[in-house]
Image (cartoon, rainbow, N blue to C red):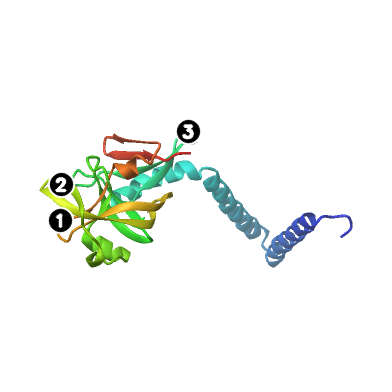
Amino acid sequence: MFGLTDESVARLVYLLLLLAFIGGGFFSFRNRLSEAIRHALIWVGIFALIVIGYAYRAPLMSLAGPVLSELNPSRPFEVTDPDGVRSLMLTRSDNGHFTVAAEVDGVQVTFLVDTGASATALTFRDAERVGLNPATLTFNKRVQTPNGIAHEAIIRVDSFDIGPFAVRNMQIGVAERGNLPISLLGLDILNRFASWRVEGDRLILTPDV
């Protein structure tokens, strides 16, 4: 139309609508110019705050993450360092351990992070919650636990997600009923990250780029 591209036409229509909106606002305040200017400045301030919030969204989320994690230590929060490297952080729980809320096949499960465990395992109850039927599983894998030798069944889950970090078609263990008080997240998951480390009360997980 008139040599304009579709994008230019869309922008023109948007500007005309915006001018109509602003003009209509001033028309309604035609006898109250000072009030019209005050309302315009309020909208300008709101727009400026939105722009500033978007521009500094990364540092703002870095500040908000630790606050949210204090309310729920199992919830991983994402931070970005000055070099643009993104990491997940967990806060140590009151009992001195790290726990993490992960999703197994879309169901949230709380795991105890156990750097001494080579493999990740679900409790019998959590396996039921995920949609498995542990009664039909074969518990034939011997594993060493603090209480001695126990047995697990080996299954595969379609998805295992920790925040934005995702693993597909993952092998995982299922403990016999009563043999595991809480599901364990072991080195088979931790070692899928590019790096992981403990700094004070924070567990820092850095995914591969």
Between disc 2 and disc 1, whose residue precedes? 2
Instruction: Give the CA separation, mark 3 to mark 2.
Output: 41 Å
Please provide percent x and percent y for residue 84.
Answer: 49, 36
Q: Quadrant of residue 108?
A: bottom left
Q: Which residue is mark 2?
A: 145
Instruction: Give the CA separation, mark 2 to mark 1.
Output: 9 Å
Between disc 3 and disc 2, whose residue precedes? 3
Side of 182 relative to 187 (left or right): left
Mark 2 is surrounded, within 10 Å at the Cα level, by few (under 14), some (14 to 19) or many (20 or more) other residues, namely few
Q: Quadrant of residue 7?
A: bottom right
Please provide percent x and percent y for residue 131.
Answer: 32, 66
Identified at 17% across, 55% down, the residue is 181
Between disc 1 and disc 3, whose residue precedes? 3
Identified at 22% across, 67% down, the residue is 135
Q: Nearer the viewer, residue 128 or 66?
A: 128
Q: Nearer the viewer, residue 11 or 131?
A: 131
Q: Which residue is mark 1?
A: 179
* Dot in front, 1 or 3: 1
Q: Which quadrant, please, contains the N terminus? A: bottom right
Please provide percent x and percent y for residue 31.
Answer: 70, 64
Q: Which residue is mark 3?
A: 82
- The type of residue carrying mark 2 is Thr
Asked if labels 1 and 2 touch by Cβ distance under 8 angstroms, the answer is: yes
Q: Give the label on residue 40, or none.
A: none
- The type of residue carrying mark 1 is Asn
Identified at 27% across, 46% down, the residue is 119
> Considering the numbered disc 2 on the image, is that residue within a helix, a strand or a loop?
strand
> Considering the numbered disc 1 on the image, is that residue within a helix, a strand or a loop?
loop
- The type of residue carrying mark 3 is Pro
Side of 204 relative to 33 (left or right): left
